[in-house]
């Protein structure tokens, strides 16, 4: 019996205001959604900077663990919405607590990315 936890697949900027997060579905689905649903002037920037994290092992361990717990809660949110809410709150707290380390890794892996680190959002070109 394999007792190892499944590895999370980590990505930068799957959503423009979330710097690092694990995939919940194939990245192809998110890219298709961006092409179909986002504003035309945002699409190229979103797709260019939506990248797999090269060194997820450098992400803070507590942040990674809370994301794993959140992902598990996401799979069961209809059965136990309260557990999902707690996991989501814990994930957001861990993100804020470890944001400087996460941002530093992003700067190393994605130089030139138009991410506003103070406001925690991707900057899009003006239409």
Image (cartoon, rainbow, N blue to C red):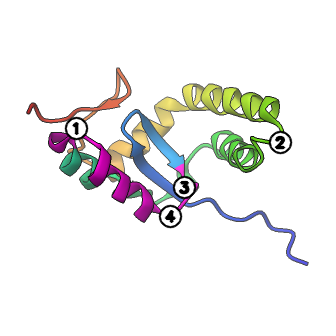
Mark 1 to mark 2 CA distance (whole Å): 39 Å
Which tag, 1 or 2, sits closer to the chain's start? 2
Residue carrying label 2: 79
Q: Write down the residue under mark 3.
A: 23
Q: Position of residue 68 (x, y in %)?
A: 70, 49
Mark 4 vs mark 3, CA separation in Å? 7 Å
Q: Nearer the viewer, mark 1 or mark 2?
A: 2
* Direction right: furthest residue: 1
Q: CA distance from mark 2 to mark 4?
A: 23 Å
Q: CA distance from mark 4 to mark 1?
A: 24 Å
Give the number of marks.
4
Query: Circle 4 sits in a helix, a strand or a loop, which is it?
Result: loop
- Classified by dominant secondary structure, the portion drawn in magenta counts as helix
Q: Is residue 38 magenta?
A: yes
- Left or right placement of residue 127 versus residue 38 in this view: left
Which mark lies nearer to you, 4 or 3? 4
Q: Give the labeled residue for mark 1.
A: 114
- Residue 26, which numbered label? 4
Residue 28 in the image: state x and y as whole percent.
41, 64
Examine the structure image and report whether residue 121 is included in the region drawn in magenta: no
Q: Of callouts 1 and 3, which one flags the residue occurring earlier in the amino acid sequence? A: 3
**As displayed, is residue 127 above or below residue 118?**
below
Q: Is residue 9 left or right of residue 4?
A: left
Q: Residue furthest left?
A: 127
Q: Which residues are magenta?
A: 22-42
Give coordinates of residue 5: x percent, y percent: 77, 63
Q: 110 or 49: nearer the eye?
A: 49
Q: Earlier in the sequence, mark 4 or mark 1?
A: 4
Q: Quadrant of residue 9?
A: bottom right
Q: Nearer the viewer, mark 1 or mark 3?
A: 3
């Amino acid at each position: 019996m394999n007792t190892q936890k499944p590895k999370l697949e980590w990505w930068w900027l799957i959503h423009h205001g979330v710097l690092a997060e694990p995939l919940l579905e194939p990245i192809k689905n998110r890219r298709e959604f961006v092409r179909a649903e986002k504003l035309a002037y945002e699409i190229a920037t979103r797709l260019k900077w939506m990248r797999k994290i090269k060194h997820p092992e450098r992400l803070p361990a507590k942040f990674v663990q809370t994301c794993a717990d959140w992902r598990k809660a996401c799979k069961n949110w209809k059965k136990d919405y309260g557990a999902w809410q707690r996991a989501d709150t814990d994930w957001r707290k861990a993100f804020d607590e470890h944001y400087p380390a996460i941002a530093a890794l992003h700067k190393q892996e994605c130089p030139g990315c138009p991410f506003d680190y103070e406001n925690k959002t991707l900057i899009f070109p003006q239409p």
